[in-house]
């Protein structure tokens, strides 16, 4: 398994992570692993949904050419 070190983590984020890990009854490392896994899996699931419905991982290609002719602006002359 791979190892990951996180440097320059904001103190407030670290405290929140410690509280969250205590609430879940797991170690700080385990909480971080679970969060990272959830975020990565959510991204993969969303990519699959885009591919399924739009055929493209990052969205759809739209025809941006405008086939309409501009209208004449409304006049305020009486």
Image (cartoon, rainbow, N blue to C red):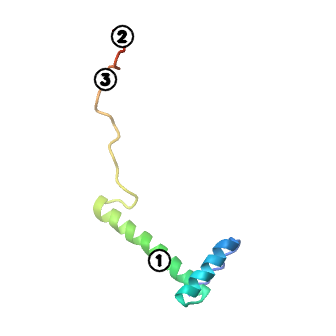
Of circles 3 and 2, the one toward us is 2
Q: Residues within 10 Å of mark 1 (few under 14, many from 20)?
A: few
Residue at left 56%, top 90%?
26
User: In which image quadrant can residue 46 be found?
Assistant: bottom left
Q: In the rendered structure, which disc, 3 or 2, sits on the residue that comes first in sequence? A: 3
Residue named by callout 3: 71
Residue 23 position in % (x across, y down): 55, 86
Q: CA distance from mark 1 to mark 2?
A: 62 Å
Disc 2 secondary structure class:
loop
Residue at left 36%, top 14%?
76
User: In which image quadrant can residue 5 be found?
Assistant: bottom right
Q: Which quadrant holds the C terminus?
A: top left
Q: Residues within 10 Å of mark 3 (few under 14, many from 20)?
A: few
Q: CA distance from mark 3 to mark 1?
A: 51 Å
Q: CA distance from mark 3 to mark 2?
A: 17 Å
Residue 3 position in % (x across, y down): 61, 84
* Residue 9 visible at all: no
Q: In the rendered structure, which disc, 1 or 2, sits on the residue that comes first in sequence? A: 1
Residue named by callout 1: 38
Task: Judge whether 58 appears above or below 39 on screen.
Answer: above
* Residue 52 visible at all: yes
Count of numbered marks: 3
Disc 1 secondary structure class:
helix
Of circles 1 and 2, the one toward us is 2
Residue named by callout 2: 77
Q: In the rendered structure, which disc, 3 or 1, sits on the residue that comes first in sequence? A: 1
Q: Residues within 10 Å of mark 2 (few under 14, many from 20)?
A: few
């Amino acid at each position: 398994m791979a190892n990951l070190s996180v440097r320059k983590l904001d103190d407030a984020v670290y405290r929140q992570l410690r509280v969250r890990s205590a609430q879940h009854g797991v170690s700080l490392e385990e909480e971080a692993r679970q969060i990272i896994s959830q975020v990565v899996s959510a991204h993969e699931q969303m990519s699959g949904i885009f591919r399924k419905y739009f055929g493209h991982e990052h969205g759809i290609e739209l025809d941006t050419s405008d086939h309409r002719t501009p209208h004449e602006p409304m006049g305020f002359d009486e």
